[in-house]
Amino acid sequence: MTTLKQTPLNAAHRAMGAKMVDFGGWDMPVNYGSQIDEHHQVRNDCGMFDVCHMRVVDAKGDGVRAFLRYLLANNADKITVPGKALYSAMLRPDGHVIDDLIIYFMTEQWFRIVVNAGTADKDIAWMKEQAATHAPKLTITSRDDLAMVAIQGPNARAKVWQVLPQTKAATENLVNFQAADCGEYFVARTGYTGEDGFEVMLPKEKVESFWYELNKVGVKPIGLGARDTLRLEAGMNLYGQDMDETVGPLESGLGWTVDLKSERDFIGKAALLTNPPTKKLVGLVLLDRGVLRGHQKVKTPHGDGEITSGSFSPTLEKSIALARVPNEVQVGDSVQVEIRDKLLNAKVVKYPFARNGKGLIS
Amino acid sequence: MSNPTNLKYTASHEWVKTEADGTITVGITQHAQELLGDMVFVEAPAAGRKLKAKEECAVVESVKAAADVYAPVSGTVTAVNGDLDSAPEKINSDPYGSWIFKMKPDSAADVAALLDAAAYQAVVDSEAH
């Protein structure tokens, strides 16, 4: 039996009545009661998520921008204002996805990178391997001393300022996808819910008191269950479900993050140019009664596809999914999904399904 | 919430109530609904369908996952609870009041042989470890 890894908030979750589950080797809260209530809490007010299992990585030294320009599919040159963030895929030479991540431009000597929990060790090994060849003077440091909490929802920023008033001046003018380094607190206007809010990185030993302080001003804890339905409604990919090392970004709905226009070379670019995708990611809304789930087969007039993520949308009160289907499938098409022994009708839609408290599918 | 002692249970987390006319009413237990979380869809077997004991015959889906419901004994489905179509969350708020289907068992002895509340609680406790 393997021991599950724990974040510094483990005891707090248990004290708050969380139902804990094994999430990729981490002992994490799936909900604190009702997953649907938690979902609405974030869309309508605000909630907080333990994302300490995600990994913060600092890349420092001369030439860090040039290195990231080569390492990532999105172009690090797009971020020039200090604190600005960029979402990108990191690709293998064959164009498949190692991970998706966010980079923050702090100075020309320092970019901060946040990667997924399950892929962190592999990501850092890959970054170091590439740096050894292309930027040997860079230092790449896994910030295991940092914790991270996401506070999300229309009232999230105000609640954070109540608890951390000293960060307000530096963070109240942040635009979406921008961060400020406030000493011990690194505050980013980013998230994974489709709502406004902050992701706060702070020293591990301070995170438990921060969590309880937030709770005292009315921020409710939200489990991974609602985190998944919130991100799915917001049309955000989940690594390991919607893409992994067997597919490329262009067939994973990430074309908007891949810069193929500039002269710049990057790892995976040649493979993307020589192997144009035959499939793409679309949104589905189920018209019949039931629930869409990952790996269900999607039957279309242009061939079969597969659901990558599916669930029940609490905002739309319908079942929704992301599915990888042949390129010829278009928004508005009717398709069928094989659920157990039945074929159920679904409609191809443009996603996101919901953001900023509102459903976007009529 | 403890498991009512007037009901019978299965190791697969169904509860069974014997009615005065000998038919049985079937639902899922408090423990099962708690494991699954917020319920969003119930698919019940068609009335008239003949079921074998332990056959998959219904599906309950929460936001999180789908779970099969098994026939507690062999018999014939006599009714399904249509209320759950529009309000599957009743299973969460009142698991022992929210029946999924009724059936006429082939043998009353099969029903009598199901777990009692204490034996079912032992099954739940053993799964917690």
Image: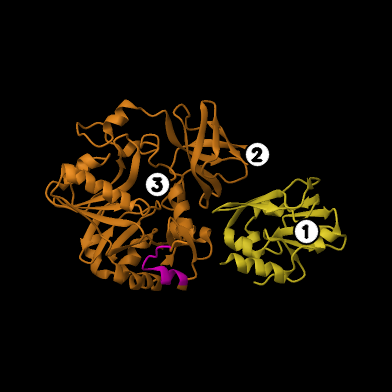
Chain colours: A orange, B yellow
Residue denoted by label 2: A341
Q: Residues within 10 Å of mark 1 (few under 14, many from 20)?
A: many
Residue B65 image offset from top left, x and y in percent: 56, 52
Q: Are marks 2 and 3 in contact (CB under 8 Å)?
A: no
Q: Amino acid at mark 1?
A: Thr
Q: Tag 1's secondary structure?
A: strand
Q: Is residue B92 left or right of residue A214?
A: right
Q: Is residue A298 left or right of residue B42?
A: left
Residue B76 image offset from top left, x and y in percent: 81, 49
A150 versus A130 height, above or below: below
Residue denoted by label 3: A239
Residue A125 located within the stretch drawn in magenta: no
The stretch of residues the image draws in magenta is A4-14
> Disc 1 is attached to a residue of which chain?
B
Residue A8 located within the stretch drawn in magenta: yes
Residue A91 image offset from top left, x and y in percent: 30, 40
Which of discs 1 and 3 lies nearer the camera? The answer is 3
A188 versus A220 height, above or below: above
Looking at the image, can residue A193 be seen? yes
Q: Tag 3's secondary structure?
A: loop
A57 versus A164 height, above or below: above
Residue at the spot 44% in from the left edge and 59% down from the top edge: A42
Residue denoted by label 1: B25
> Disc 2 is attached to a residue of which chain?
A
Q: Amino acid at mark 3?
A: Tyr
Per the model, the C-alpha gap separating discs 1 and 2 is 26 Å
Residue A222 sits in quarter: bottom left
Q: Amino acid at mark 2?
A: Asp
Residue B35 sits in quarter: bottom right
